[in-house]
Every structure is written in structure tokens, then in C-alpha cells.
Amino acid sequence: MAVKIVTDSTSDLPEDLARELGVTVVPLSVFFGEEAYKDGVEITREQFFERLTSGGIHPHTSQPSVEDFVAVYKDLTSQGHEVVSVHVSDKMSGTMNSARLARAELQDAKIELVDTGLAALGLGMVVKFTAEAANAGQSFDKVVAAAHEASANTNCFFVPATLEFLQKGGRIGKAGAVIGGLLSIKPILTVHNGEVHPYTKVRTESKAIAKMLEIATDGGPYAEVAIIHEGQSEAAAVLMDHLASLSDKPVVQGKIGAVVGVHTGPGAIGMVLRKG
């Protein structure tokens, strides 16, 4: 019997890392009109962004079904495992609600749900820390505590190329989208209390990257850091070189997946900073 970690596909955890850690990823779905695709299973991130940028229907997302979670939980608990299920902010998605309803159907199973208040690789880094605790043989209660500790100690900052997609997805108000489109203003956004909030604004993308470096430096050093992006290889390399000096652990590198990409659009870049 072991403690097993479950998360959802908004974590954008690199596939090889999830496999190495033994993490089960439950996919959300992306819809183009009536066509539904399970994130990372029925549509790759490359296929998604190609379709997103080709025009036409703006996609929307849906959380995993209760049945999706029941199937995963049953599979793990029937083998005698305990489950810590670590997920995207309840304020951003109905994923936690599906997980709650699934747990309610399995009264005899030992399953703990953790709302990280995060998304994308911010969530992914909490999952990584939690899985490492589980794989080190820590008790169920200590693994749950590790998830909560990492959630509280993780900060995310990101710069979208445009606020259009966040506005369309209802993740930021129309006023914010209008302001972000004026005078080439580049907003730096963060996740606070489970929701996306503006952190500061600069005039150009290069200044945005410089500001991200400043934010990281001012708060360092860190237990672990990560970068995530879509189509921003050069800026990501600059961030990675700098972040590498702020933590003893290697920088985790991730790519924005389909579900998160619905809201960030192409050209976004972000960093994750986890304290002790």
C-alpha cells in the first residue's frame, strides 16, 4: 500500500516528469463548438495551438466528469492505495467539485482533496513536491500536509501576449482587457486567493521580462523554480538562466497545454517560485 497522487491536466506537468513521479493526471476537455477533446489525450498542445490561431470558433473548456474521477480513484484504492488528489483552484474550475462528488461515492476509500488555489505549472510544482513526499514513504497525513505547505509557499507570475483570451474565458474583466491593449502595455499577472489578479504593468515585452527577473531576485532564494511558456523560447531561456541562480534545484521547464492555453492564448510566458 502506498500514497498515490492524482492531479488534473491544468497542472501542465511535463509528461515524462508525471510518469517518473507516478502521478495520475485526469484530463479536462477542450471544446471547439460541439467537438470535444480530452486535454493531452485526444489533442496535443501543438494541435490545439495550431487550431486556436487558425481562427474560427473560440474554444471553451470543461472539467473532468465525476465518472472520470471515480474510475481513477477506484483503480488506485482497489489496489490498497491511499489517494491525495491535488487540483486547480476551485475558483477557476469545477474540477474540484467533480472530485468531491466522486469521493462521496467511495465512502470507504481514503481520499484527500487539496485545492491548491493555483493553476498551470504553479499547480504542477505543488504536485511535484507532494509526489516526492509520497515517494519518499511519508505517511498519508504528512503527504497531505506537504501539499498544503507547497500551495501556501508557491507564487506564480505570467505575462500573456494579449488579454483577449483571458477576457473571452471570463478569467479577467473586460476593463482589464481594454487597458492591456492600450499603448502596448504588458500586464504582469499573478494568482492570488485562487484567482488571476494584475500585479503590475510595463510598456513592452522586454520590460516585462526584466520586471519578472526583478520580482524573482527580490524574493529569492527559492526551494524550487520553474518556467512555462508557449512560443517564447528566447525569453524563456533568459528567465531560466537567471532563475537557475536562485535555487539549488534544476529549473523545471514546462509548456502551456490546451486547457490553460484556452485562457492564456499563444505567446504567454510565466514563472513559478516556491519557497521552502
Image (spheres, rainbow, N blue to C red):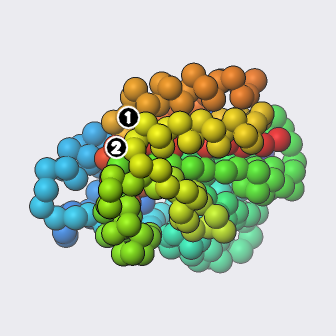
Is residue 69 shown to the viewer in this render? no
| Label drawn at residue 267 | 2
59 left or right of 23?
A: left
The foreground one among 234 and 125 is 234
Q: Measuring 40% from the left and 26% from the top, which residue is drawn there? A: 234
- Mark 1 surroundings within 10 Å by alpha-carbon count, few (fewer than 14), some (14 through 19), many (20 or more): some
In x, y percent, where is residue 34? 19, 70
Q: Quadrant of residue 62?
A: bottom left
Q: Measuring 54% from the left and 30% from the top, which residue is drawn there? A: 239
Q: Measuring 74% from the left and 42% from the top, which residue is drawn there? A: 219
30 left or right of 250?
A: left
Amino acid, disc 1 = Gln
In x, y percent, where is residue 224? 71, 35
The foreground one among 188 and 112 is 188
Residues marked 2 and 1 touching at CB (< 8 Å)? yes
Q: Quadrant of residue 109?
A: bottom right
Measure the alpha-carbon separation of dots 2 and 1. Answer: 6 Å
Is residue 53 shown to the viewer in this render? yes
Q: Which residue is mark 1?
A: 232
Q: Secondary structure at mark 2?
A: loop
- Mark 2 surroundings within 10 Å by alpha-carbon count, few (fewer than 14), some (14 through 19), many (20 or more): some
Tally the numbered discs.
Answer: 2
The C terminus lies in quadrant = top right
Q: Secondary structure at mark 1?
A: loop
| Label drawn at residue 274 | none
The N terminus lies in quadrant = top right
217 left or right of 59?
A: right
The foreground one among 97 and 260 is 260
